[in-house]
Image (cartoon, helix red, strand yellow):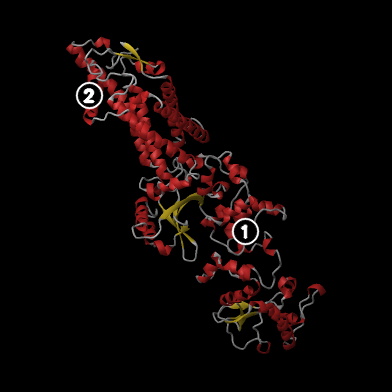
Amino acid sequence: MGTIMDGCSTLRKIPRATLCNGLAIAVVAAALALPPIAIPPAFAADDAPSASDQNCLGCHGSPGMEKKLEDGGTLPLQVPADMFAKSIHRSIGCTGCHSDIDPAAHPPAKNDIASARSFSVAMTQICRGCHADKFDQWESSIHAALVRANNPAAPICTDCHNPHAVIKGAATAIDQIPCKKCHTEIYAAYLGSMHAKARLKSEQSYAPICSDCHSAHAVKPTSLGEGPEAACFGCHAGVLEAHQKWLPDAALHFEAVSCPACHAPAAQRKVDLMLIDSKDARPLGTEQVGVPVFEASSQSGGKGIDALTLWKLLQTLNRSGMTGKTVLRGRLEASTGPQAHQLTDKSKAISDCRTCHSAGSQAFQSVTISLLEPEGQRVDYGASADVLNSVISLQSVGGFYAIGGTRIKLLDILLILAILGGLAVPVGHLTLGWIFNRYFLARSQTGAPGDRPAGGGPKAT
Amino acid sequence: MQRLYIHPLPVRCWHWTNAVGIVLMILTGMQIRYLGLIDMVSFRTAVNMHNTVGFILIANFFLWLLYYLSSDRIKVYHPELSPRKHFLGSFQQAYYYGYGIFKGDPNPFHVSIYRKFNPLQSMLYQIIMMLLLPIQFYTGILLWDVKRFSAQVDFFGGVRVIDTVHVLIFIFLVFYVLVHVYLGTLGHTRMAHYKAMLTGYEDVEEVAAGTEP
């Protein structure tokens, strides 16, 4: 069942399948009911709106037309006639979406629209009537989750698609991408990437825009490690084989290192340790784990959660009686979203092993521990860099390890002791032999010290 | 002195392959772990060498095992079943290395074809050959391709746990190699044991009749 606006604030459910069929009737009814109160603009014969639409545009084509709302805001009511004429929605006409308007009582005497936002959110159900598949995808997205969480900035249909000026393919033009309205920094970074450069060079290029990697409607948090990289591999087929030619343990690198960590060489890198359920690798939510421990750690020293606190947290989450097993999944990634989009040509990508496999590597100085918020958005809490090379983390961060870069300091001390001990045995033994020869055997004259080497022990050959 | 054929050719081949291999593994392992502090070869070369030499050592281990399992010389690895005898022998040997050797005392242990390890060596070599090297090879294989063996890696607690075990045995082997090279000089001459491991023949003092070897 679809829904359609009845008035401006209440919804009346109608069968979705009958919606479009009813449009023609509504158009005729509206044309008969509404008197022409202004001269409609002139159109070319092939893109002229219908007579009833021209009636609507007689008023709504006027520049600056708007409505004062209950919240003190305004609702723009102007529909630029020339844009609407070119719009793909011209074919369904005004009443295709605004069938709730009573021509006899229009404009209504009473202002019943609470706010522009609530009106737009309610109107998404109209979009759903025809675009059910896209709407369902959107409902599964992080955008819809944020709308459900009453985030006023979360995008709905009309934030990306101007319903009165929808042109097929417009959203794929690089300068028309709607995402840039909110994700300005990421868009700026993208424009500097080799993807955007290739796209700008030729519209025919296969180089991706936002929706190619993140999907247009089923947008998911990019950092969950599902969508974007699957998208990378979708175009860059055979990359694993290509990396295996020069990169040892390439498959492991693909799992533990995000593509931008190497292919955005100017980016700062960080390690994200995501709390997941080991059974299905599902990220844990803030409501499951609780956040006081993270907040307390970041407030106390500013460095974030340390190795011991992290170990205790894992112990608590995995105490007997708990279902499932919580583990940390480590991943090296670009520090911020914009940095992750500074993708360069592969010739400039990082291929020097030192970047990660030497002590003190920048890549391991920044660590976060991430959880999912109820809306599905990832939230990162700071952690001390020592969680990566403390012996306490042996179990808790067991799944993430970069040889050299995150080595355990205690083992370095043990190695130094082993070398010193290994050298001390011969040096000490030879010294003892020398002392014995010089001060005991020589004095006692009982043996034949000359038969033995200076250090005692066997004869030299 | 009499000359006894203590080290057959297969054992000598295994020993020197092992010796060179373990030194290479230590050097490349150091390079891999301490990139930046040590710059002998590139990281990638070190990893590739480490992997290649590692597999050679694993093959060499199985050749050693095959040889001893098919030879009566396996008796040299038979443990001393009497704890009292074993610990007494160990104490005597430790006393000799720590004190007696300086006074010119004779080595309490007498080599024979089927008994070439003194009690300290016997205990240590069994631990190394039957426990530490197999664990080192196994953890090395897991680290060689973590993704392929991810189920086993996860079973043991993750790649960090596997690596820590690998590094702990590596640390022990560093200590062991340094001490082993020195103890090899404590024959009746400095080079006696080295020569024996090249020729196969040990110079053995003749034991007086009626003396327990």
Q: Which residue is mark 2?
A: B92
> On the rendered structure, is A281 left or right of B115?
right
In the image, residue B1 above or below residue A360: above
Identified by mark 2, the residue type is Gln
Mark sitting on residue B165 = none
Quote the CA–CA distance across marks 2 and 1.
77 Å
Identified by mark 1, the residue type is Cys
Q: Position of residue A115 (x, y in %)?
A: 56, 78
Residue in front for this viewpoint, A18 or A10 = A18
In the image, residue B122 above or below residue A127: above
In the image, residue A195 above or below residue B210: below
Residue in front for this viewpoint, A313 or A261 = A313
Location of residue A214 (image quadrant): bottom right
**Residue at (75, 86) in percent of width and height:** A36
Q: The N terminus of chain A lies in which quarter of the figure?
A: bottom right
Location of residue B200 (image quadrant): top left
Q: Secondary structure at mark 2?
A: helix
In the image, residue A162 above or below residue A264: below
Q: Position of residue B135 (x, y in %)?
A: 39, 37
Residue A60 can be seen in this image: no
> On the rendered structure, is A109 left or right of B136?
right
> On the rendered structure, is A277 left or right of A157?
left
Q: Which residue is mark 1?
A: A210
- The reply to whether the C-beta atoms of the residues labelled 2 and 1 are less than 8 Å apart is no
